[in-house]
Image (cartoon, coloured by chain):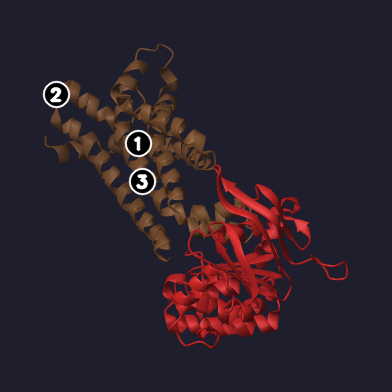
C-alpha cells in the first residue's frame, strides 16, 4: 500500500485529525494574539517593560518543544485536559513573534507622522487606533503569519500528550516504523502550514502597501 | 509689556527656558505674538526654533518661566483643547500616508464631531483656499507632488479654523519655484485670515517675505526681535552675518549697507 492509498483508505480519520489540528493551532494562535498584540502595544507605551517582556517571550521560545510536551506527558491528571494544555503550550510559543512584531511595527511608524497627529490634538487612543495600528498592521500580520505557521508545525507534537491532531499519524508511524503513516500526518500538516503562510502573506502585502503610500 | 487696554497676546513667552538632561535648548525667551501678526523665527539648525514651537502646543513644557496661549499658561490648558486650537504645519506636510487627502484635511473637524455635511463643505472650501483641485480629495499623499502635499498640510492645519498657526520649515522640502509660489500664496492667505502666526525657517529671504517681525535665534537664545523693515539694517554682528550670507541675491531689503 502506498501513501496515497493509505490516505484514501483512512480519509475520514485524516479529515478528523486535520480539523483537530486546525483547531489546536487556530485556537492557540488566537489566544496568543489576544495576549501578544496588547502586550506589544503596552511595551511601546511603557518602554521599561520592553526588555523583560521580550526577554521572557524569548526564554519561552528557547525551551525545546518536545521537552515541554514531554514534561506534561507523565502527569496523571492530564487526561481530558490534554487539548487545553496543548493549546496553552502552543500559545506560549506563538507569543514571541506576536509581541515582537507588534512592538517593532508600531516603533517603525514614521515619528514625524506620530508627532503631527499628537500636535493636532489626537488623544493617545485616537493616535493608536487611527494612526499607529493601521500603519503597523502589515508588520503585525507578518507576526500573526509567523505565529500561525509555527503553531501548525508544533501542533504535531501535541499528539505526544494525547491532544490529537495530525501528530497522531506521525507518532503512530514512528512506533510502527511505517513511513506511509508518518507521511499521512506530515504531508497534510505541511500543506496546512503552506496555505496559512500563503493566505496571510497576501493579507500582509495588502496591509503593507498602506505604509508605502507615504 | 502690554498696557491694560490691549488684549493679552495670542502667544507669549515669559522668560521661558527648556533644559533637556541639564542641557539648555532654550534660555530665558521673552517674546510675544499678537493676533493677526506673523512672526518669523530665524536661525540655524539647533538654535532652538523648533523647541520654541513645541512649547506653544505643549509637545514640551518649559522647565522654567511661562509660555502663555491666549493669556493662559500652557500647563493649565487641557492639552487636547490647546492643540486643537493651534494649526501645525511641518516640512513635507506630515500627512497620514494611509488617509486620503479628504480624510487628512477633515481629521480635526471629524474628531471634533462636526456634522458630515459641514465637514464635506469645509474640505471643499479648504481645497480651494490652498489652490488644489477638488478631485485630488480622494488621492493618497504618495500620489501627490511635494507642493501638493504641502498645500494639503496647510489645509489640514486650517481645517478647524484655529486662531493660531505654527509652521516648522513648512516649505523647506520644496523646489525653489514651488516654494516661492507657496510663500506668496501664504502671505496673501495670512492677509485675509489674520491669525497669530509663528513661522520657523533658516531662510532669510523667506523670513523677509513673510514676516511682520523677525526674531533671530542662536544657541537657544533670542538675539534680536525686530520689525521686518529694520532687520537687515541691524548692526548686530549675527544679523550682519546672516544678511551677508544671503547677499548677492537681488532683493529690495538686501541692499548693501
Q: Which residue is at the front of the view, A20 or A111?
A: A111
Image quarter for residue B7?
bottom right
Residue ranking furthest to the right: B5
Relative vertical location of residue B164 with respect to residue A51 in this rendering, above or below: below
Q: Residue at x 60, y 84 (%)?
A: B128
Task: Tell me the element at label 3.
Answer: helix
Task: Tell me the element at label 1.
Answer: helix
Q: Residue at x 52, y 60 (%)?
A: B47
Q: Is residue B102 visible?
A: no
Residue B88 position within the rendered picture, expressed as x and y whole percent measured from the top left:
60, 66
- Residue count near mark 3 (Cα–Cα under 10 Å), binned few <14, some 14–19, many ≥20: many
**Residue A145 numbered tag:** 3
Q: Is residue B247 visible?
A: yes
Q: Colour of chain B?
A: red
- Of the image marks 3 and 2, the number of the one nearer the N terminus: 3
Residue A29 position within the rendered picture, expressed as x and y whole percent measured from the top left:
42, 38
Amino acid at each position: 500500500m502506498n501513501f496515497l492509498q493509505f490516505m484514501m483508505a483512512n480519509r475520514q480519520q485524516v479529515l478528523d485529525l486535520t480539523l483537530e489540528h486546525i483547531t489546536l493551532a487556530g485556537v492557540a494562535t488566537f489566544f496568543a494574539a489576544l495576549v501578544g498584540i496588547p502586550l506589544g502595544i503596552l511595551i511601546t507605551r511603557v518602554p521599561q517593560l520592553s526588555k523583560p517582556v521580550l526577554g521572557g517571550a524569548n526564554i519561552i521560545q528557547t525551551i525545546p518543544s518536545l521537552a515541554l510536551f514531554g514534561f506534561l506527558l507523565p502527569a496523571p491528571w492530564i487526561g481530558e485536559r490534554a487539548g487545553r494544555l496543548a493549546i496553552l503550550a502552543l500559545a506560549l510559543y506563538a507569543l514571541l513573534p506576536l509581541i515582537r512584531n507588534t512592538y517593532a511595527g508600531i516603533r517603525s511608524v514614521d515619528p514625524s507622522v506620530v508627532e503631527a497627529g499628537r500636535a493636532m490634538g489626537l488623544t493617545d487612543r485616537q493616535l493608536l487606533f487611527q494612526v499607529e495600528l493601521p500603519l503597523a498592521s502589515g508588520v503585525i500580520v507578518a507576526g500573526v503569519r509567523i505565529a500561525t505557521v509555527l503553531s501548525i508545525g508544533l501542533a504535531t507534537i501535541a499528539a505526544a500528550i494525547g491532544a490529537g491532531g495530525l501528530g497522531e499519524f506521525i507518532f503512530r508511524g514512528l512506533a510502527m516504523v511505517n513511513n506511509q503513516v508518518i507521511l499521512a500526518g506530515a504531508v497534510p500538516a505541511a500543506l496546512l502550514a503552506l496555505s496559512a503562510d500563503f493566505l496571510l502573506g497576501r493579507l500582509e502585502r495588502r496591509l503593507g502597501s498602506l505604509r508605502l503610500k507615504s | 509689556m502690554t498696557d491694560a487696554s490691549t488684549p493679552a497676546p495670542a502667544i507669549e513667552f515669559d522668560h521661558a527656558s527648556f533644559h533637556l538632561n541639564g542641557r539648555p535648548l532654550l534660555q530665558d525667551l521673552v517674546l510675544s505674538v499678537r493676533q493677526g501678526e506673523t512672526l518669523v523665527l530665524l536661525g540655524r539648525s539647533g538654535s532652538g526654533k523648533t523647541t520654541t514651537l513645541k512649547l506653544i502646543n505643549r509637545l514640551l513644557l518649559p522647565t522654567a518661566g511661562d509660555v502663555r496661549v491666549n493669556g493662559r499658561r500652557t500647563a493649565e490648558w487641557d492639552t487636547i483643547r490647546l492643540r486643537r486650537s493651534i494649526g501645525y504645519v511641518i516640512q513635507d506636510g506630515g500627512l497620514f500616508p494611509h488617509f486620503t487627502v479628504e480624510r487628512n484635511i477633515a481629521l480635526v473637524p471629524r474628531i471634533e464631531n462636526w456634522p458630515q455635511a459641514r465637514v464635506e463643505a469645509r474640505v471643499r472650501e479648504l481645497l480651494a483656499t490652498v489652490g488644489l483641485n477638488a478631485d485630488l480629495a480622494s488621492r493618497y499623499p504618495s500620489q501627490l507632488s511635494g507642493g501638493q502635499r504641502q498645500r494639503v498640510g496647510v489645509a489640514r492645519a486650517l481645517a478647524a479654523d484655529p486662531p493660531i498657526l505654527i509652521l516648522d520649515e513648512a516649505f523647506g522640502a520644496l523646489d525653489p519655484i514651488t516654494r516661492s509660489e507657496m510663500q506668496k500664496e501664504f502671505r496673501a492667505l495670512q492677509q485675509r485670515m489674520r491669525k497669530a502666526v509663528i513661522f520657523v525657517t533658516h531662510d532669510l529671504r523667506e523670513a523677509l517675505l513673510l514676516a511682520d517681525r523677525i526674531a533671530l535665534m542662536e544657541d537657544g537664545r533670542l538675539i534680536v526681535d525686530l520689525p521686518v523693515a529694520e532687520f537687515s539694517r541691524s548692526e548686530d554682528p549675527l544679523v550682519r552675518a546672516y544678511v551677508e550670507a544671503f547677499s548677492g541675491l537681488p532683493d529690495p531689503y538686501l541692499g548693501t549697507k
